[in-house]
């Protein structure tokens, strides 16, 4: 009875973590779209720096209240993480600006195979045939839903390549650091958020000026636009935290697969809020394929012989010492 209760509790926490990530991610998309499209605040990199500044403030308050305990993260590890994370943010912004929507979506979809490759090479994880096929169905479904025109240029391809690899490395590294240094989500954010805030707030205005030919200090900061900036930063705290929580509970690949459900939800929300415009047989077919693929992936990756699992062997005494940890890693989906 106890194991069943523990499994049910884990499943409930997994669902709650994922829903937390979905709600905050979709919310920040809607708020940022209003901020940039309606009020003209097109300084995406600087805004991300503000997000991490607000996240830093949250971690300072939580540390003062005693919810974050003292922990250690070596500076070289922190530096590598910040490089991956910042290249991810800048690469995504530049890729979206220099590429067509279709190629931008293809680049985002390629993060799943790149994340798989990282886990196979660095963590020695194996995927069953069913797991691989289910990932393929998810990719096909999301591609059918979202990809329209596809045009490629050399500088756009370079930006997309940097964005894909840096984002995949950043998400892998979140899980790696949490596991290696026994860091909780709050603790890891306490180390990384201040460094990201400092670098992005310094570099952001210059990069945004190069991309938009507008200066962030010349923007018309009225009451409504400032409200949306504060709202975006507040929601971003939840988005940053939920990402770390989800990657700690799942693997980077599973986080990517589940992440595409947000794309489906955004399309569905668009149908309810804006009517049938843009909803056609192709989009519906893509949604059905993607959802079927996600259900298949969940079943395939959770089977004893078919889930993502480590393939290296350990000695019997070491296995006894770390038996709990190994079972937790094998249990991640």
Image (spheres, rainbow, N blue to C red):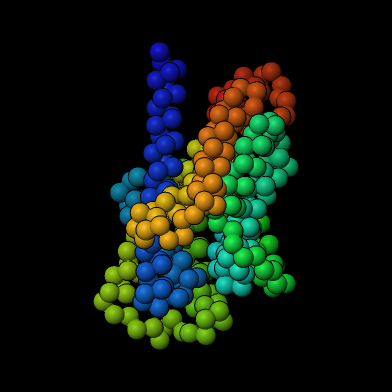
Residue in the image at 40% along x and 34% along y: 13
Q: Relative to 310, is 148 on the left or the right?
A: left
The image quadrant where one finds the C terminus is: top right
Q: x%, y% of residue 267?
A: 45, 54
In the rendered image of this protein, does residue 331 appear above or below residue 194? above
In the rendered image of this protein, does residue 245 appear above or below residue 108? above
In the rendered image of this protein, does residue 210 appear above or below residue 171? below
Q: Nearer the viewer, residue 241 or 289?
A: 289
Count of picture labels: 0
Residue 256 visible in rendering: no
Residue in the image at 55% along x and 48% along y: 286
Q: x%, y% of residue 61?
A: 32, 55
Q: Nearer the viewer, residue 239 or 29?
A: 29
In the rendered image of this protein, does residue 144 appear above or below residue 54? above
Residue in the image at 68% along x and 62% along y: 161
The residue most toward the left is 223
Q: x%, y% of residue 21?
A: 42, 48
């Amino acid at each position: 009875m106890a194991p069943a209760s523990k499994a049910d509790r884990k499943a409930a926490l997994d669902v709650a973590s994922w829903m937390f990530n979905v709600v905050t991610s979709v919310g920040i998309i809607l708020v940022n779209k209003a901020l940039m499209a309606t009020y003209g605040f097109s300084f995406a990199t600087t805004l991300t720096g503000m997000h991490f500044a607000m996240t830093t403030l949250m971690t300072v308050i939580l540390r003062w209240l005693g919810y974050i305990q003292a922990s250690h993260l070596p500076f070289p590890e922190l530096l590598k993480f910040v490089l991956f994370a910042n290249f991810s943010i800048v690469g995504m912004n530049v890729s979206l600006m220099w590429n067509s929507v279709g190629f931008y979506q293809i680049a985002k979809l390629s993060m799943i195979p790149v994340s798989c490759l990282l886990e196979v090479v660095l963590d020695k994880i194996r995927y069953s045939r069913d797991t691989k096929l289910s990932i393929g169905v998810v990719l096909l479904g999301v591609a059918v839903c979202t990809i329209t025109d596809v045009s490629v240029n050399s500088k756009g391809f370079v930006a997309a390549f940097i964005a894909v690899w840096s984002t995949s490395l950043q998400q892998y590294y979140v899980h790696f650091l949490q596991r290696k240094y026994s860091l909780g989500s709050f603790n890891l954010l306490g180390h990384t958020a201040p460094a990201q805030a400092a670098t992005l707030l310094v570099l952001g205005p210059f990069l945004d000026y190069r991309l938009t030919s507008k200066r962030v200090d010349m923007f018309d900061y009225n009451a409504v636009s400032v409200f949306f900036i504060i709202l975006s930063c507040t929601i971003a705290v939840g988005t940053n935290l939920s990402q770390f929580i989800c990657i700690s509970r799942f693997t980077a690949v599973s986080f990517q697969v589940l992440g595409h459900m947000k794309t489906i939800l955004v399309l569905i929300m668009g149908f309810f809020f804006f009517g049938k415009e843009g909803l056609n047989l192709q989009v519906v077919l893509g949604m059905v394929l993607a959802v079927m693929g996600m259900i298949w992936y969940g079943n395939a990756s959770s089977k004893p012989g078919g889930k993502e699992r480590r393939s290296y062997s350990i000695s019997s005494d070491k296995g006894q010492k770390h038996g709990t940890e190994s079972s937790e890693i094998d249990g991640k989906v």
